[in-house]
Image (cartoon, helix red, strand yellow):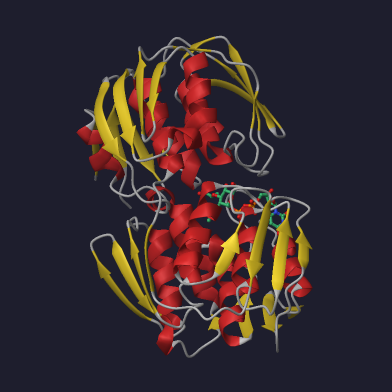
Amino acid sequence: MSVIVISGGRRLEGCVPVQGSKNSVLPILAASLLSGCVSVIHNCPDLSDVAASVAILEHLGCRIAREGDTITVDSSTLDRCDIPEHLMREMRSSAIFLGAVLARTGEARLSMPGGCELGPRPIDLHLSALRRLGAEIAEQGGGLRCSARSLQGCDISLTIPSVGATENAMLAACAARGRTAIYNAAREPEIVDLQRFLCACGAKVRGAGSDLVVIDGSVPLHSAEHRVIADRICAATWLAAGAAAGGEIEVEGVPREQLLPVTDLLAQAGCDVREESQRVTLISDGYLRAVPPVRTASYPGFPTDAHPPVMAALTKGTGTTVFVEMMFENRYRHTQELARMGADIRVEGRVAVVCGVPGLQGARLEAADLRGGAALVVAALAAEGESRIGGLHHLDRGYERLTETLRSLGADIVRV
Ligand code: EPZ
């Protein structure tokens, strides 16, 4: 198994062009099933979760071509409606295929996506939204059998502004007769990007980015070309790395408003943050001060996915910061690993109390989930001495060319 070896304590300098968004390209790949035509999707990141989605599309009978960061999906040849368990297990967010397959074929068979490292990942809101639209869904033996002779537009009210449930409802509603209104919809930029792709296919979708998304379904769809937005969580990770290691870094391609909760926090922690419309520059001496309590929330609140790398940056410095994780039960698996580097973190349920320490020491570390792994990388860049990080398959789900990106900023990092 390969590991990343980092010799920490070096300042980071330079500009990072941010990769395409994982959490945008995954639902868009699922949505490419709807038209039965050709979708040309640019700025796709090279990630194992993207490869898993492509494998599902190919299993369903689609023809896929990949050239650089462009993935072309011809879904005219789709000839199946089942997703086998081994493909479902590859990627927890494969539940997003449920709405797309159901919309396109009128039926869908897949296994329950199960939990992940972050804890149980229920899809009850997905299923209730699809049932509201007229789908019959039988849950048996860990599997889902769904059928919908016809889907009927309706009002859907989500009890939680779930990203995945909003996306599944949007995709199924595109095939429903009449109008669907999704109330308490998730407002993430990735939902806006999905709407942009669906409209490029000819769908009538509006309101994404607000808590009310309206879809006029059963509109004939056609081929489309689309460029995926930049990944705001990767950008947040690079900013946290610069804050922790010290130096001056720029991240390009993410609208400044999508990074506001993170840049505000890092500025309060003592970094000099300069923002233009699509570029953020951060200057740091590598020693951060505590900030007021951080509660994760749905967009536009503080993003749960940025929580671990930002926490890692705050472990070295002064003062005490309280984190409250409101989205996932098992978001703190990285804290034990950070403690092995000398970090002072106390976890009680969803609350983590970080007391800044003068310095961190390199150690042998193991990533247990995607963003927790990013936290270990951030801490290792700030630590004195060498760190060796295993569990890289978690990082490969969300960060393309991680070592090349950090090496371009001056980090002493290799993957062996
Ligand atoms: C998406 O996951 C992202 N994944 C996650 O990013 C992100 O952390 C999350 O949204 C929150 O922003 C993708 O987009 C592929 P949710 P999703 O449904 O859709 C509960 C990463 O690291 N819930 O908004 O699964 C759920 O348990 C990943 O890139 C239900 O109870 O998140 C959670 O507590 C991790 N029932 C909360 O809602 C449901 O039916 C928010 O989950 C659905 C969700």
In this rendering, would 65 be left or right of 115? left
Residue occupying the point 37% across, 52% down: 396
Residue 297 appears at what percent x and percent y?
65, 38
Residue closest to the eye, 309 or 102:
102
Residue closest to the eye, 29 or 340:
29
Say if residue 413 shows up in the picture.
Answer: yes
All told, the count of numbered labels is: 0
Residue occupying the point 76% across, 63% down: 156
Compared with 346, 25 (above or below) is below
Residue occupying the point 29% across, 64% down: 70
Residue 25 appears at what percent x and percent y?
43, 59
Quadrant of image for the C terminus: top left
Compared with 126, 243 (above or below) is above
Residue closest to the eye, 1 or 20:
20
Compared with 309, 177 (above or below) is below
Compared with 64, 371 (above or below) is above
In this rendering, would 415 be left or right of 374? left
Say if residue 364 shows up in the picture.
Answer: no
Residue closest to the eye, 345 or 190:
190
Residue 194 appears at what percent x and percent y?
51, 60
In this rendering, would 146 be left or right of 74? right
In this rendering, would 131 be left or right of 23? right
